[in-house]
Image (cartoon, rainbow, N blue to C red):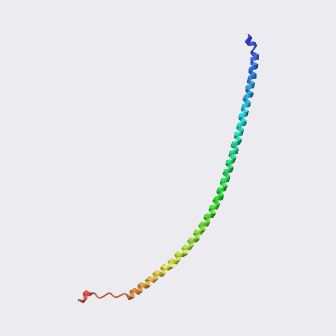
């Protein structure tokens, strides 16, 4: 019966050990929670930095896009001016072509006037 008389004392020791274990587990979970809170804060900081970088990248892209559009507009205007000048040159060439055609007709008329007549057929002379 000696074991039965020790039972309340043993129960009290077990309760103390369980209480100590519970405190130890709670302390560990609090430490883990603190570490996770630190990790969560770091993830939030990284997420904020990525969002900031994305916003900056979009801003810079938009600025570059505007500069490129302005530059291409100038190039297009330059090509428009060049096209207008080429149109003028084409019109001049059309005039020159018309003058050459007229000159060619006049030369053909002169040649036709002064062209030797066909010689008499020698076979007819015999």
Residue 52 sits above or below residue 16 on the image = below
In the figure, residue 65 lies in which quadrant? bottom right
In the figure, residue 40 lies in which quadrant? top right
The residue drawn where x is 54% and y is 74% is: 87
The image shows a total of numbered marks equal to 0
- Relative depth, front residue between 68 and 125: 68
Residue 66 sits above or below residue 104 on the image = above
Residue 108 sits above or below residue 42 on the image = below
Say which quadrant the N terminus sits in. top right
The residue drawn where x is 72% and y is 31% is: 28
Name of the residue lying farthest toward the left? 126
The residue drawn where x is 44% and y is 82% is: 104
The residue drawn where x is 71% and y is 39% is: 38
Say which quadrant the C terminus sits in. bottom left
91 sits to left or right of 74: left
Q: Position of residue 23 (x, y in %)?
A: 75, 28
91 sits to left or right of 41: left
- Relative depth, front residue between 50 and 11: 50
Residue 86 sits above or below residue 47 on the image = below
Name of the residue lying farthest toward the top? 1
In the figure, residue 111 lies in which quadrant? bottom left
Q: Position of residue 117 (x, y in %)?
A: 34, 88
4 sits to left or right of 94: right
Q: Position of residue 22 (x, y in %)?
A: 73, 27
């Amino acid at each position: 019966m000696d074991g039965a008389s020790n039972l309340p004392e043993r129960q009290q020791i077990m309760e103390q050990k369980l209480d100590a274990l519970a405190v130890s587990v709670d302390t560990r979970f609090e430490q883990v929670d603190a570490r996770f809170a630190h990790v969560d804060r770091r993830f939030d900081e990284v997420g904020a930095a990525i969002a900031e970088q994305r916003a900056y990248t979009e801003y810079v892209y938009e600025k570059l896009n505007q500069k490129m559009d302005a530059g291409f507009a100038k190039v297009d205007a330059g090509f428009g001016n060049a096209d207008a000048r080429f149109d003028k040159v084409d019109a001049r060439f059309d005039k020159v072509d018309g003058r050459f055609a007229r000159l060619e007709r006049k030369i053909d008329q002169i040649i036709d006037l002064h062209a030797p007549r066909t010689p008499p057929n020698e076979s007819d002379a015999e």
